[in-house]
């Protein structure tokens, strides 16, 4: 039997009410579906909503008044609304909520929905839909929103009856935040919005079969504790799922109990403070040498809320080849998806680690802890020999982008929330900022969405004002290419009083794509020069970012030298009544190192051109690396995987 597709399901929607479908429930307050939608959001405790109005959702917008209990933030593009809700959700731990119209309004939300799905961000997207008589007729601004978003949502609803609205919103909010968080789409037909219903609260949810596992089974905990006892080279590989679970304290306790190093994925930066000596930083394609090397040489890999992403693992069959694996994840679909674990543990990361730490303590009370001094001697030798370094001086006298990122970190308040776009600047931010607090780093990880940065920073700043009295400043580190994809949201940042601070690392090119073209495509720079920050007299820069900022009533500053950069950052930190944008003119051919070429083994990691330490390290017990600094080839380029291609927007 073939299950109906979402579009086929639409064709089965009842076109007009019949006598048997009349409202029979009379308990509650009589109102329209649109009024019920607003009331349900208020009763759910939603305090901030992002969006843009349109025809098919106008009945709902008609019910938003000055006395509505949530703040509405009017964005300038639906994609911006979605990313703002994501930034808000990550910064606050709340569910991000958007309200948009049908057709193009909903399709513009597809990218943020997919982004939230990849990064497990709790999102409720409410979209308008044409009336039920028009569904399937190609009516004006009709789109199969449920069908279009079906592959990239956690769950979705098409609401055709006003009476269903409160229950559906209660379910959507619960589904978005529970289990593995994710986006939920609620597509509300105009018929349901204008129809009458009887409102009551709370609503009884109808979710048969949806019972996320949070608590681990005892036998797998004992098996996991036994693997720790047998390990002499453990590594805790911590992902975004641990951050979503607020499990920073539990991760640190596990690391301290077992004396294990911590390596993180991009979304997990800051889950344990960088100042903790057990934190080795990010691993993978652009991770620290110590983090990547430790993972490759470990004998026990403990994946904690991580999904073995290809940017982390490189060539999967060569990833941590000698390691036994414990995989902890609340989503059973992730267990064994890319690497079969020796001990699979399904459950909420915080709850699992609480139980696992207790089990390990019991075992250590009887048998004592394992001596891992040789393992740490090797790790520390990697740290000392291969620290995160860069050339501060550039051939053309422009700023080093890495230096700019470090200076931003040096001058920032400890409570700063950092947001990035996607590209080289994103990697430098992850490598060089000192992250001392969880939920202080917001970036598009799995989808790699250019244009994510500015709206996400606005959402984070709205969340900072809501939950922290604005005492957590928000810095956006963005690229000139990434920034221009959603730069119109400067209007929302100013008008809605979200004084974000923006650092544009302006190299006048799509930086990560140019890096790949340099290394893998014969230095053929096809369509990567965008001429918005050239440091030559004969090129007109379009746009002029300082004038662009000023056009939106923001403060614009340009910095070409280190002295100008220091002064600009200091000034930006002192301005809190409007957004500030700094146009840092940086070197266009600066590259992100270390690097593992796409599809290659992490053993091929290039620390800097000509230096591939792990190819000359004979084994995990070798603390010396006498040949590590010898050039690998004439160009110093890392090996290229067969069939490697550029990755377009995800690589800027």
Image (cartoon, rainbow, N blue to C red):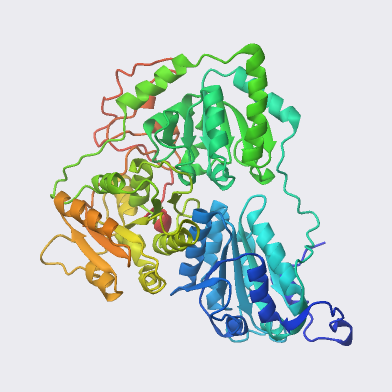
- Give the image quarter of residue 199: bottom right
Q: Looking at this rendering, what residue extends furthest in the right direction?
A: 20
In this rendered view, identify the residue nearer to me: 408 or 141: 408
- Residue 611 position, x and y percent, is 29, 30
In this picture, residue 270 sits left or right of residue 15: left
In this picture, residue 503 sits left or right of residue 587: right
- Residue 14 position, x and y percent, is 79, 81
- Residue 138 position, x and y percent, is 63, 84
Asked if residue 39 shows in the view, the reply is: yes
Asked if residue 340 shows in the view, the reply is: no
In this rendered view, identify the residue nearer to me: 388 or 396: 388
Quick one: quadrant of the C terminus? Answer: bottom left
In this picture, residue 303 sits left or right of residue 78: right
- Residue 83 position, x and y percent, is 48, 63
Residue plotted at (38% across, 44% down) = 430
Quick one: quadrant of the N terminus? Answer: bottom right
In this rendered view, identify the residue nearer to me: 534 or 216: 216
In this rendered view, identify the residue nearer to me: 126 or 460: 460
Q: Is residue 3 above or below residue 217?
A: below
| Count of numbered badges drawn on the protein | 0
Q: Looking at this rendering, what residue extends furthest in the left direction?
A: 537
Q: Is residue 472 above or below residue 270?
A: below
Q: Is residue 387 above or below residue 534?
A: above
Q: Is residue 216 above or below residue 87?
A: above
- Give the image quarter of residue 592: top left
């Amino acid at each position: 039997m073939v299950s109906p597709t979402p579009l086929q399901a639409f064709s089965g929607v009842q076109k007009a009410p019949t006598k048997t479908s009349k409202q029979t429930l009379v308990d509650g307050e009589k109102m329209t579906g649109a009024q019920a939608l607003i009331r349900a959001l208020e009763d759910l405790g939603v305090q901030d909503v992002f969006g843009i109005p349109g025809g098919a959702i106008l009945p709902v917008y008609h019910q938003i008044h000055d006395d509505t209990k949530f703040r509405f933030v009017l964005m300038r593009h639906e994609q911006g609304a979605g990313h703002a809700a994501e930034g808000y959700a990550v910064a606050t731990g709340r569910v991000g909520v958007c309200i948009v119209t049908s057709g193009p309004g909903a399709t513009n939300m597809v990218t943020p929905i997919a982004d939230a799905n990849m990064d497990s961000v709790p999102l409720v997207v409410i979209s308008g839909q044409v009336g039920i008589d028009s569904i399937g007729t190609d009516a004006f601004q009709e789109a199969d929103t449920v069908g279009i978003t079906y592959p990239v949502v956690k769950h979705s609803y098409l609401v055709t009856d006003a009476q269903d609205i409160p229950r559906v919103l209660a379910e959507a909010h619960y589904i978005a935040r529970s289990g593995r968080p994710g986006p939920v789409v609620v597509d509300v037909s105009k018929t349901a919005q204008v129809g009458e219903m009887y409102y009551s609260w709370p609503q009884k949810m109808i979710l048969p079969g949806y019972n996320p596992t949070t608590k681990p089974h005892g036998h797998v905990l004992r098996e996991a504790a036994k693997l720790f006892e047998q390990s002499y080279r453990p590594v805790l590989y911590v992902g975004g799922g641990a951050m979503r679970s607020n499990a920073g304290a539990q991760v640190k306790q596990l690391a301290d109990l077992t004396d294990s190093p911590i390596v993180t994925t991009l979304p997990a930066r800051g889950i344990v403070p960088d100042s903790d000596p057990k934190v080795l930083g990010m691993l993978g394609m652009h991770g620290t040498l110590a983090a990547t090397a430790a993972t490759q040489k470990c004998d026990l890999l403990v994946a904690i809320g991580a999904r073995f992403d290809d940017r982390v693992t490189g060539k999967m069959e060569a990833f941590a080849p000698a390691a036994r694996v414990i995989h902890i994840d609340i989503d059973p679909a992730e267990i064994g998806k890319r690497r079969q674990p020796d001990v699979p543990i399904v459950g909420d990361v915080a709850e699992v680690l609480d139980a696992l730490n207790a089990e390990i303590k019991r075992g250590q009370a009887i048998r004592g802890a394992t001596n891992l001094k040789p393992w740490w001697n090797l790790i520390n030798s990697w740290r000392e020999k291969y620290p995160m370094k860069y050339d501060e001086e550039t051939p053309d006298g422009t700023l080093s982008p890495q230096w700019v990122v470090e200076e931003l970190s040096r001058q920032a308040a400890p409570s700063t929330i950092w947001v990035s776009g996607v590209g080289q600047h994103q990697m430098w931010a992850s490598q060089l900022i000192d992250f001392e607090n969880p939920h202080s780093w917001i970036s598009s990880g799995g989808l790699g969405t250019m244009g994510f940065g500015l709206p996400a920073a606005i959402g984070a700043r709205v969340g900072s004002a809501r939950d922290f009295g604005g005492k957590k400043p928000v810095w956006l580190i963005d690229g000139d290419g990434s920034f221009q994809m959603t730069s119109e949201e400067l209007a929302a940042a100013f008008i809605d009083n979200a004084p974000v601070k923006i650092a544009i690392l302006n190299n006048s090119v799509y930086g990560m794509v140019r890096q790949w073209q340099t290394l893998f495509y014969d230095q053929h720079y096809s369509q990567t020069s965008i001429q918005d920050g050239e440091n030559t007299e004969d090129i007109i820069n379009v746009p002029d970012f300082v004038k662009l900022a000023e056009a939106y009533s923001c403060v614009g500053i340009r910095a070409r030298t280190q002295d100008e950069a220091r002064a600009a950052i200091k000034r930006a930190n002192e301005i809190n009544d409007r957004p500030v944008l700094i146009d840092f003119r940086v070197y266009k051919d600066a590259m992100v190192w270390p690097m593992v070429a796409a599809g290659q083994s992490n053993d091929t990691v290039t620390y800097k051109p000509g230096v591939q330490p792990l190819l000359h390290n004979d084994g995990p017990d070798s603390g010396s690396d006498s040949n590590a600094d010898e050039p690998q080839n004439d160009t110093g380029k890392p090996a290229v995987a067969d069939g490697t291609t550029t990755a377009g927007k995800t690589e800027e």
